[in-house]
Amino acid sequence: MIVFIAEAFAGLFIPPIRFKEFIQQLYFVANKSLVIISTCVCFAAVVTILEYSFHLKLVVQNDSMVPGFATLLILRELGAIITALLLCSRVGAGYASEVGSMQTTEQIDALRMLGIDPINYLVVPRLIACVVGGMILTIVANLTCILVAMLISQSYLGFTPTMFLSAMHRFVDFKDFFFAVVKGACFGAVIPLVACYYGFRCQPGAEGVGKATTNTVVTASIAIIVIDFILSYTFSYLY
């Protein structure tokens, strides 16, 4: 896998640049996933506000810090990690089954016979699209999550939007938002690399494609959680 990842990143600097394929993959990653991610982060925002309010009232009998704590959690963890795991289950599974089917039907071998590098043709456009799509979707997820948290705080806790933004400003700054986007890019890079790795090594038959898809989702999910820990630990020294 290390060799495969090295070849994929090296392919970023090797022409030709397949812009049309990149746009198609970006549409598949970003546009097709937008509704699913937005819906899920809305519910995550509701749960976050309600849980923070309940526990702060239980411990300190005051929920005035709920907007700040909730926004901090959303920007540093929830927005990026929920987006990445949903992309992993949707995009990762799709890529693994697509590339795996091409492997079992010898289409990848046909590309090699035509003098086309399969890494450059299949992996690189998907890698760039997932990195860009992961960043875009992380931004949208964070903004949607914060907006829903603001609405829930207003209806359930009585915080006006001005009070919410004021409390949020005391806890978060631009660095939190920037680090969230960095996480989105890193998580996005993991998905096509793992998916194409298992797709290229898919065994013949429907069972092989299913196994490659399962391995992709499991491996990528674990990798995302581990990378999230590493990045969070690293960023803790930069806040």
Image (cartoon, rainbow, N blue to C red):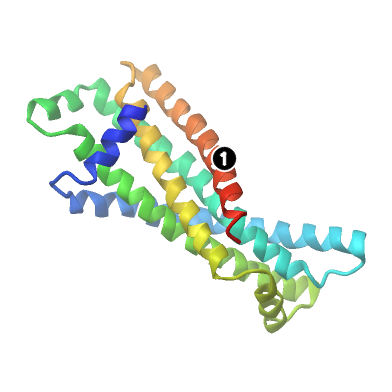
The residue beneath circle 1 is 225
Residue type at mark 1? Ile
Residue 186 visible in rendering: yes
Residue 91: percent from left, percent from top: 41, 42
Residue 159: percent from left, percent from top: 76, 78
Query: SS at mark 1?
Result: helix
Image quadrant holding the N terminus, namely top left
Residue 119: percent from left, percent from top: 23, 35
Q: In this view, does 213 lie to the left or right of 224?
A: left
Residue 216 sits above or below residue 73 on the image: above
Question: Which of the 4 quarters of the picture holds residue 121?
Answer: top left
Q: Which residue is drawn at 8% across and 25% down?
A: 113
In this view of the protein, which residue sits in the foreground, 99 or 131? Answer: 131
Q: Residue at x 57, y 49 (%)?
A: 234
Q: Which residue lies furthest to the bottom in this view?
A: 162
Q: Residue at x 20, y 39 (%)?
A: 120
Q: Which residue lies furthest to the left in this view?
A: 114
